[in-house]
Image (spheres, grey):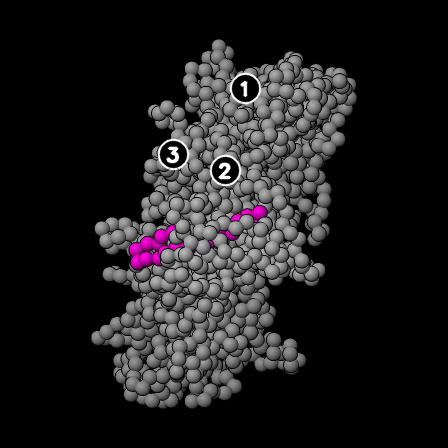
Amino acid sequence: MRHAPHPCHVPSPVPTLYPQCTPPFLIQFLQLIVTDGYAFAEVKVKHKSLMSRKLIGSCRIPLVEIAGAGPGGLRKWFKLLSADYELSPEPRGEIELTLTWKYDSSFKKAKAKPAPVEKGRRGRPAPPPKANNTGLVEDDDEEPELNLSVAEMEALEQARKERVEKAKKQIELYDAMTSDVKAGDYQVQAHILEVTDLKGESSSGLSNPRVTVNCMGLTQRTRVVKQVSRCVFDEKLFFNFKNVDPTQIQEAEVKLTVASKNMLSTPVIGTYQVNLLSIYGREDHELYDQWVALTDPSNKDDTGVQGYLKVSLTVLGPGDKQKFHDLEKEYEEAKEKEESGAVSGPDIKPKLHFLVVSVFWAADLPMMESGITGSGTNCYVRVDFAGNPPLKTKKDYVRGRSGLSPEFMEQLWIPVMDPTMSTRIALSLWDHDFFSGDKLVAHTYFDYRDVPQLDKEAGGGGGGFFGSMFGRKTYQGPPPRWANLYGAPLDVRGRKAGKVMNTYPDSASTYRGRILLGMYVDPAPSKKEIEFIHKKEFDFDVPDSLIPAVAYYTIRASVLLGSEIPIFKFPNADGAAKMKVMVDFGCQRLEFPFRANKRGQIEWLENAERKDIELPADMRQLPDVGIYLVRGPESQAKTVSWARVPAARLLAESFSGAPYWQTLEPDHSRDKTRAKLGATNYPGALLLRLGLGLTSDASSFKWKDDRKVFEDKRPYCLRVHVYQGRSIPAKDANGLIDPYVKVRFCGSKQKTRVAKETTDPLYYQTLEFHETLPGDLKFAPEVVLTVWDQDVGGANSQVGLLRYSLVNAKLTKTDSSPPAPPQWLALEDLNGGPTSGALLVSFQLIQKRDPGEKYGLAMPIAPPCTRGASYIEVIALGVRDMAPYNYEHVKEPKVRFDLPGIEENFTFTTRSSRYPRGRDANFLEKQIMVVQLPDNPAYAPMLAIRAYDRRLGGLKTVLVGATSISLSTKLPWNSEGYVPPQSQLFDEVVEDSEEVKEPVAVPKVEGPVEDEDDEPEDADGDAGVTEQKTSEETTPAPGTNDGGTGAFLALPRGTEAVSFPHVKEDVELLKLLANRVEPEATVVETEEEQASWWATDLANIDLAFEDDEEMSLADLGIEFPSSWVSAQFRAGRDWWVKQNGGEVEQYLDTAPFERYPLFRGVYHPNPEKSTIRQVGTFKGIIRVCESDPRMGAQLIDMRALQAPQKFTVRLYVVSGKNLQPTGGGLSDPYIRIRLGTQYINDTSSVQKQTLDPAFFKSYEVETTIPGPTSLKIELRDWQRFLPTHELIGSTTVDLEDRWFHKKWQGIKTQKNSDGILMLEPLEMRNLYSPDSAVAQGQLEMWVEILPTNQAGNKPKSELFGPPEKKFELRIIVWKSKDVPKHRGINLFNKVELQGFKAKQTDTHWKCKGGAGSWNWRMKFPVTFPVKSPLYGRLNVQMWNRDIISSNDIISEYAIDLYPWFLLAYHREDSVFPFQEMKEAKARQAQLQSATPVEDEGEGDGEGEGEEEGGEGAEGKSMPKPLIIGQDEYATAEIKMVDGDVFEDGEEEGQADEERPFLEESSEEEEEEEEQPAAELAEHHEGRRRVEQTAA
């Protein structure tokens, strides 16, 4: 350099600085990348001082000149010019440069190959350059071809394909995760059965357990049981949730907590937690009869299993049916696998595992607090799992306003008892605030089943011995990964409005940062590990190699148009707020400026791009791309709607995606702010293009500037052909609407005519729009069609909306071209969600030659009807179950049928009828309409059915219900969709329905019907009402004859000859009842009789099993009954239940008559605000014929309907199952029946305090067919002090459909697989209530329908439930042995029969050697049957009495007496369990040895020999090993011999007597205390032999 007064500086790369050198001597080699050969090389020389840099001079050299110098390059002195490259008055000096232009093939290859993935590193990455919003400039110059080998080209393409394939798999995984659960009503049932082996919370070693169930914010509890370690609850708890979002089900938990309820505290014994989704995903949506291990994660001192809980959990959602369980059959199967006499316990062996969560640090966190001390966040991470208390990391305070990165560097250790059904790991980030409370930032969830287990043998040892002794350990477990956090918009953080978004990330709108986590399960933790939640600071280094590798990405977006953008009006010049769009990728943002909102249409035409965004190379760790619509003004900017696009979806397109319309979702966190959408705003849609990929790939996918497309606009004529609408949501109280269609396009709008009072309008109108559109129709605005309801005298209201892209429109060149075939397009509600209703429309786009070209009127679009006359035959049977209108019962209804035609409308009306009564009026007429129907079934109109009621003596007619049906499936010339008459499926019509999805011909509904006619009609009605009340000894009287002539019967041919076999009675049961002799008086045993019984029976008492071998009851060959009641009535009727059938309609499949629900009310997108409901049913047959149906075969012989026919209906109700209580706890259900005007309130059928009532009731009523044939069976909860009894649930049987069905008539002519004649089947019917779409229980029943003139030939079968029989359970506690204790202990025993208060023996004071003696008899008066096998449990406890402190339990044992209860009940005689077991074993041994076996139970009481220690006959009483309750006692045995079981027991009060069986003097007791154990045994033996001989 010469003539330069100061040193020089050359732009990047920066050369060496030469201070104080004039002229400087500089040799510096610089290398720059050149991609454009026509550019310039610019060199600047600067002077650097302490405060600034001053330009000395600059020069520009064309690259063409350098290239022209050849391979040797250009070496030359260049004059330094000014900053504008102009000559200066004063010389600036010269600089000598050598410039060479070389082609570097290695650089080009490196550029073409995938970008190298960098190792992760700590700290925030440098912020990338600001987004380029100036537009993407199209580059028409082609780059020089890459000089790559074939192998290199293949490797490059393969790498790109692998990235695309991984992205597609990630998309599939995302779609699978978001489509599992349906939205709607859900019910969670928790059946708490029993607990066992509970840890004692009191000084006695026992607890007062109570089970608490928490589910989705609701809590319920069982009763408290006092002083037990095991007990039976047998309580059902129900949780009902309405309008549940699928995300809530996926993340919800059921937490079971067993605690001991004490006077001053309620310490937790143990908990268990289950993910709701894991239950719902199981077969039948239930976890049935399952033992679970209880742990106490809240107490550091309680380690391991704290007890066991047996529970059944069921989750029922929309359309789900609950499985029916036969408890008696299941108990019988279970007992075959169990040991004799023993109660089966939990067969699980939980093992301690640890979930280890390593929390490294967070990144990209937003500012959560600001104040005087500064802005930033003071945050921590919290993990919740498996019922453990929340475990938190330390807090870390970081200052800043965005991109905050706090460090935690801790491991969270959470104990897990494996196997576990807890699957959801909840990880949340919180901001600590000392004054206002901690605020939730965001949640994220993980599946425990996806967490890998630590394989220590494979090298996960953490550094080995030397690593732990002389240095830090190494990290063990899988590599950490980033977890992205999502929540509400940042300006609503911490508020209640954003709680849902902050809790459920799938419904969240905003990226809130990410956390670096490592997670694994330690299946074999060290014995030194604390069995409690705890945390540890990292004791290992975190090298860069451990951090996820990063790559550099480019996000590219083009926002072109907005359609149906919400309008926010302000009192300003524009009249509406301006809107802008933001696109976020992680913490990087592309902004598109505010634009004016012109009637919901906005043009942005903006492009933006951001490069070199440093994020994880693993696409599973990439955040979603967020799209936000923001309302202005800038000072009050708020997001109003949003969308999230998975990064994997964009990576799969690899910058090659086309523009598309993105539908937005409303931001519900703004519902209470000025940015809420309200009831009239749609969230909007955006036409945009998104691209995401590696920066190295971005240059290979250049986008053309989409804005240029809008410069090439062409004139078009858009014709929107509106044909029909169907199932438009009702907006008037009568269930109808006055709809018209408004079409908006390019800021213009037109509308159709108004169709009056119909939900299925016909329009056949064409609306035209003349606009200039882009040549590429992908960039054309959408066509928006909205359906409105005209309200005369009020404001019109918008009902639904649909959007249509012109890409799919038919493009024609002339206006005379026919339109495309129309198609049905579904409507959306104002929030973009699904709703009922659809429009039949077609779109035609005509390209004009010039904008001024005029077209004539469009050709009519009415469909051709060239087939001539068609015939619609309507057989109107009648209306059924019409609900009151305006608090008045329907008196005299009629039905009008309207068929809108193209040129004329067709209509007819039935006659008015009040017979047999208004709500079930019969019409019994056939009408034929001669109509013109379109040739194409797609244009078939809807037939409107409207029911009217005459009021004020005919002076007024009111609409009481309406519906419409599609004729397209009834057209015989519809070759694809024709359905012949009498083919309607039963499951297409559910009688009990509340949820109405599509008010069309046969909507599929899942819930109950609202019954406004809950009470009998008043005396002013046209039909009388008969209410029948039954008593305990009588059955309901038959219903009264209505005497009406409106009921006529079309009997199937041969009906009179149908024979009805008698129901087979239980012959054995009748014999037993006939021979049964009731005792005349209560027998009181004297002491001598008691002693005599003892002396005689003690000789027969021996060990049922003399060795340690245990046998199941099934192996003993004892025939135990399986049920309290004879199942004879099931013979021939259980064929449907055995096929796992539910309701009989599933067997019949199709209905003989078509049923069309009638509706009334106003539709609203929010189900809680919608009043539309089913108010009745039209019943009949509707068919379309090509010829006059009067000339052909008849569906029904109408002449046969001239004589009324009476029928006898018999209803047999067996039991109810899984009933939901109306007020929590238990219910007192009873049966209420309604058929026509007949009501039966059978309060005698009340079953007290149960959810599984056994009714065994039969009823008989009369009716006419056709007529009031909806047999409604209700279960109500009886309340003594309330005037009305609350409905539990109801079910309705349509008798007409059954009687006229061929399958029903053919049932009694077939035999089942066992050769038994098939009778009317037992069925399990679901019960529904108007408050829920989920079943409220099941009813086991069957129905018989008999012509009354034949009913006398078959008497009604009376169902007998198991009669109550009183027995007495007698138990003798003889003695104990081998209770180890160094010093004498004071032994006594408690015996408890489930459902009774525990009884106890006296105390054997200072018992030496654990040999206690009581000879104590206890009596329990029992009434059979008991309600479940759980109430056959006999619990025996051994205690040590302590005078000073509380008593201590030593051990416990439970015996299952339920099969013996059944045996005694059916024998009606005494049963001796141990004796029968002994005899059964002897028989088994005899069969095995084929040698006779002497009966050891008789004789003088001496066995084959005494046991060691001198034990005699008393030593052969049944020893029962007990479960140890305290560590200080070893395993002990208690010898317990059962007493006799007598019917009717002794006098009242004597049965409760607790006294020694043989009284002993106090002197003898004192002597016993001093005698050693062997002498004591000998003493007892001698005394008993003497007493036996005397007897």
* Dot 3 and dot 1 residues touching (CB under 8 Å): no
Earlier-in-chain disc, 2 versus 1: 2
| Circle 3: element type | loop
Residue 1027 screen position, x and y as percent: 46, 30
Question: Nearest the camera: 1031 or 609?
Answer: 609
Earlier-in-chain disc, 2 versus 3: 2
The residue sitting at 45% across, 68% down in the picture is: 544
Magenta segment range?
35-55
Hey, which quadrant is residue 1359 in on the image? top right
Q: Residues within 10 Å of mark 2 (few under 14, many from 20)?
A: many
Is 82 rendered above or below residue 788? Answer: below
Q: Disc 1 marks which residue?
A: 751
Cα–Cα gap, marks 3 and 1 = 31 Å
* Residue 574 visible in the picture: yes
Earlier-in-chain disc, 3 versus 1: 3
Q: Which quadrant of the figure contains the N terminus?
A: bottom left
Residue 887 is covered by the magenta coloring: no
Amino acid at the residue labelled 1: Lys
Q: Residues within 10 Å of mark 3 (few under 14, many from 20)?
A: some
